[in-house]
């Protein structure tokens, strides 16, 4: 783990340069380019709020309105978008970069870092919109200054899981589709869209069985100035397990992947 940490620090300029390259290539030929990254969060929030609030008539509580639910969704969508994009992309990090990896000596442990930087615009837009709306509506808590704490934990979680998935993804090409389908379904049974008052206690207990639910709750604690001890414990333990297992997997797989290439 120490050697991997030193490698990530030393290769930071390289990872940043590769992220800039990926962002340019990803938007090459697109009419709106980076505009899609900015528009996607607004479209998602609009769809979720319309379906849940206006179609199903659900409310966070008896006194809440659509504006409250918009803030609720934004605060959960920020972390969820980072998770979703990071985990989905991790499954094909090696396969999608075969040509580059074959031509140069590439520090493959930095692939998740470059991928995260390249896809960070969307979540950043969500966060900015939330901060502006919360400030205008008088709902901005001082605890938002503690946001780097869960954000650091989340990035470590994604890093550890990405190391695992990128190795498995070399052999299992269907892994990306499997992860994508699971995350697409899970969002509708998670704290991203659902609050305790919107479902029965039994359904909420089922939602809490999902480890990723505790990640969203930890972020909401920072946004709302609350604290859920169990969620933070699950979050921290999950991060420790992911980084520990991921570091072992990527360390042993580096040689194997290089030989495979």
Image: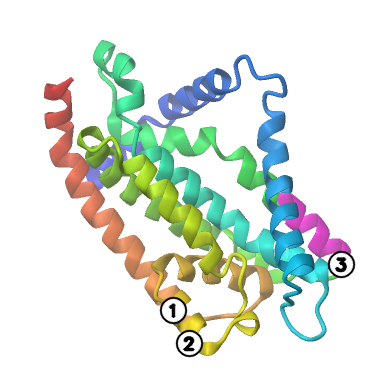
- The residue that mark 1 highlights is 206
Instruction: Using the image as rendered, state which of residue 172 and residue 119 is in the foreground.
Output: 172
Query: What residue lies at 45% left-to-right and 74% top-to-bottom?
Result: 232
Q: Among all residues in the image, which is located at the extreme front?
A: 55
> How far, Cα to Cα, is label 1 from label 3?
32 Å
Which of pointers 1 and 3 lies earlier in the amino acid sequence?
A: 3
Q: In terms of secondary structure, where does tag 1 sit?
A: helix
> How far, Cα to Cα, is label 2 from label 1?
6 Å
- Main SS class of the magenta portion in the image: helix
- The residue that mark 3 highlights is 137
Q: For the residues carrying marks 1 and 3, which lies nearer the camera in this image?
A: 1
- The residue that mark 2 highlights is 202
Q: How is the image coloured?
A: rainbow
Please identify the quarter of the rendering in which residue 48 is found.
bottom right
**Neighbour tally class for label 2: few under 14, some 14-19, many 20 plus, Cα within 10 Å:** few
**Neighbour tally class for label 3: few under 14, some 14-19, many 20 plus, Cα within 10 Å:** few
Query: What residue lies at 76% left-to-right and 52% top-to-bottom?
Result: 129
């Amino acid at each position: 783990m120490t050697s991997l940490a030193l490698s990530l620090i030393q290769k930071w300029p390289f990872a940043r340069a590769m992220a800039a390259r990926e962002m340019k290539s990803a938007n090459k030929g697109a009419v709106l380019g980076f505009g899609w990254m900015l528009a996607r969060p607004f479209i998602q929030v609009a769809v979720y709020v319309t379906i849940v609030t206006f179609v199903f008539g659900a409310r966070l509580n008896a006194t809440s309105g659509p504006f409250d639910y918009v803030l609720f969704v934004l605060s959960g969508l920020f972390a969820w978008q980072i998770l979703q994009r990071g985990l989905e992309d991790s499954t094909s990090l090696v396969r999608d970069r075969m040509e580059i990896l074959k031509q140069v000596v590439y520090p493959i442990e930095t692939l998740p870092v470059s991928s995260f930087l390249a896809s960070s615009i969307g979540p950043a837009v969500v966060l900015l919109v939330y901060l502006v709306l919360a400030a205008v509506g008088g709902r901005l808590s001082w605890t938002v200054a503690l946001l780097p704490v869960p954000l650091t934990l989340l990035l470590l979680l994604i890093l550890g899981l990405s190391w695992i998935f990128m190795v498995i993804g070399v052999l299992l090409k269907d892994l990306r589709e499997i992860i994508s389908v699971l995350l697409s379904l899970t969002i509708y049974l998670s704290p991203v869209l659902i609050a305790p008052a919107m479902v029965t206690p039994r359904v909420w207990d089922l939602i809490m069985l999902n480890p990723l639910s505790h990640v969203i709750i930890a972020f909401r604690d920072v946004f709302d100035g609350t604290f859920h001890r169990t969620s933070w414990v699950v979050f921290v333990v999950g991060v420790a397990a992911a980084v520990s297992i991921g570091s072992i997997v990527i360390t042993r797989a580096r040689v194997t992947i290089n030989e495979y290439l």
